[in-house]
Image (cartoon, coloured by chain):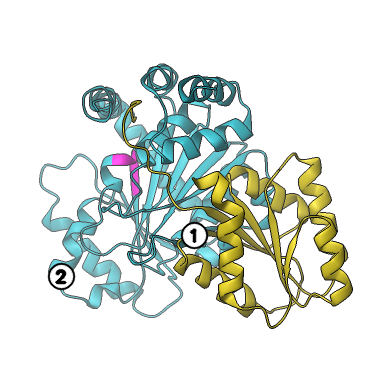
Chain colours: A yellow, B cyan
Amino acid sequence: MAVSGELLDDGAPRVLMAKTSLDGHWRGINVVSRALRDGGFEVILAGMVTAETIARVAADEDVDLIGLNVGGRVEVVERILDTLQEHGVDVPVIAGGTIPHYAVERLTARGVRSFPPGSSLEAIVACARELTRTTTG
Amino acid sequence: VPATVLAEELLARALAGERRALARALSAVERGGLVPASAALLDAAAGRAYTVGLTGPPGAGKSTLTDALIAIERAAGGRIAVLAVDPSSPYSGGAILGDRVRLAPQHLADDGVFVRSLASRGHLGGLARAVPDALALLDACGWPTILVETVGVGQTELAIAGTADTTIVVVNPGWGDEVQANKAGLLEVADVLVINKSDRDGVARTRADLVQMLALGAAGRAWTPPIIDTIATEAIGIETLWTAVAAHRSELEQSGALAERRAAERVSAGCESRSP
């Protein structure tokens, strides 16, 4: 057990990456997870899980950020945001994948940063850094 | 709010059974941030949990076995916690913690299961530096059985043996084809040996090699590690494995080795980890 006065290791920021659609497309989430790892993040992969499970895992793993892979249906993301709120999980959320333009606006209104097709990995990592800066010093 | 007060308040809530507080306290432990008073509080409450380590080469099936062991313990009505360690990148310090992908969805949503992923953060030995303190915390918070899954190990990452009460070493058919000397270290720390993916060719040969290796070190040992065939993806052999772990536990309890172990842990917690 460490004692007070010892130099604290702030550690890497922790990100939960989850898939929100049933499709078999793992490539997006894998590529982004790898980029985040290379950017110094600890990436917890949850795979394809329900909104309740995302809330549970985010809380148990005490993550600083949640990344959602979206397969076209923005309603699914909105339900996840509702569930996070219900469970008192106050963690910033970013979303990537096939997000239509109208959906980007809807998600922005809920405080979610969206990365539709064509977004660069650099932009995603930079955003993740910005959103986790306060929690990781 | 001073950090000291926060840590103690957090710990009190965790000890009272608040799951979110436990999660945050684990983060504090990972940062090395619990204060001495908290450590004393932990020591007072700890010492009841049984810790089972799962180790073996990358891809041997540790995460899938973890999933199967959670299932069997939950079916028996026991609550179970898991610490899953994955390697940090030496270049970026980042890590992919992917062990949850192998866990069944019902375990992820189960109140009787608590899984925490840890990155090794440059710590050697196949574990993360925070593992002993994280174990003490889970123990003190009333988790009766704790699985510790190591990173995929080679010949020297054997810290799990000093950490777990029972160490399960997982290998696959064909593993016995390597140079014998390579296997010695990993085999020496095994309390229970598992040949996972036992539907593949080469089980008999691997078993024969393991038996031979074990015989070499058998002199003076009170416990002979059993060798168990499993197919984790189909939950085959899991009951036999869990029964073997229970048998090893009984042996440790009856011989007094477990009590000695607990006493030694208290001493090392007082002398080593507690000094600045």
Residue A58 visible: yes
Q: Residue at x 56, y 38 (%)?
A: B23
Task: In the rendered view, tell whether residue B87 sits above or below residue B148.
Answer: below
Q: Quadrant of the C terminus of chain B?
A: top left
Q: Residues within 10 Å of mark 1 (few under 14, many from 20)?
A: many
Residue B20 in picture, x, y percent from top left: 63, 35
Task: In the rendered view, tell whether residue B64 sits above or below residue B246.
Answer: below
Task: In the rendered view, tell whether residue B267 sits above or below residue B87.
Answer: above
Q: Residue at x 64, y 43 (%)?
A: A59
Query: Which residue was labeled with disc 1?
Result: A41
Residue A47 is a magenta residue: no
* Tag 1: amino acid: Phe
How many discs appear? 2
Report the Cα–Cα distance between label 2 and label 1. 38 Å
Quarter of image, res B32? top left
Question: Quick one: B139 or A60, which is closer to the camera?
Answer: A60
Question: Quick one: B54 or A112, which is closer to the camera?
Answer: A112
* Tag 2: amino acid: Gln
Side of A80 relative to B120 (left or right): right
Question: Quick one: A96 or B165, which is closer to the camera?
Answer: A96
Q: Residue at x 45, y 61 (%)?
A: A40
Query: Which residue was labeled with disc 2?
Result: B180
Residue B164 is a magenta residue: yes
Q: Residues within 10 Å of mark 2 (few under 14, many from 20)?
A: few
Which region is colored magenta? Answer: B163-167
Side of B42 relative to B106 (left or right): left
> What is the chain letter for disc 2?
B
Q: Element at badge 1?
A: loop
Q: Residue at x 68, y 46 (%)?
A: A56
Q: Quadrant of the N terminus of chain B?
A: top right
Residue A57 in picture, x, y percent from top left: 64, 49
